[in-house]
Amino acid sequence: MSITVNIYYTGKNGSARAFAEEMEKSGVAEKIRAEEGNLRYDYFIPVNDCETVLLIDSWKNKEAIYLHHASPMMGEITRLREKYDLHMKVEQYTGIESSGDERYIRK
């Protein structure tokens, strides 16, 4: 069952956007995308809050996310988050497995 985590990074004076840009330019985000079990790792900027960046981070299963949390990438993320003095809000969602009976899914 897939797991999606929404992480809202909030800072001041554009620091959240600078954090996301450094994650991309330094190659850290790309290394995370290449990790076994990663399904998505993308940053977004809400139109109503320019001081926040949303990361949508999806993983194949719990094991994949646990391995990611134990990886050297977590240290790099923490270092950059501290560098830019960001605060986080985290939401976690679990994917719905298809049973083959699609009549209840609104299209």
Image: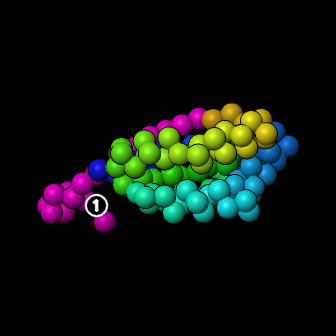
Identify which residue is drawn at 42% across, 53% down. 59
Identify which residue is drawn at 14% across, 61% down. 101
On the image, the x and y values in percent for residue 64 come to 40, 49
Identify which residue is drawn at 44% across, 45% down. 67
What residue is shown with label 1?
Answer: 106
Label 1 Cα crowd, 10 Å radius (few <14 / some 14-19 / many 20+) = few
For the question of whether residue 6 can be seen, the reply is: no
Q: Which one is in front, 9 or 84?
A: 84
Residue placed farthest to the bottom in the image?
107
Task: State yes or no: residue 76 in magenta.
Answer: no
Q: Is residue 66 rendered to the left or right of residue 33?
A: left
Q: Is residue 33 above or below residue 11?
A: below
Q: Amino acid at mark 1?
A: Arg
Coloring basis for residues:
rainbow
On the image, the x and y values in percent for residue 50 come to 75, 49
For the question of whether residue 105 can be seen, the reply is: yes
Range drawn in magenta: 89-107
Task: State yes or no: residue 106 in magenta.
Answer: yes
Query: In the structure shown, which secondary structural element does the residue marked by tag 1 occupy?
Result: loop
On the image, the x and y values in percent for residue 95 come to 33, 50
Q: Is residue 69 rendered to the left or right of residue 17?
A: left
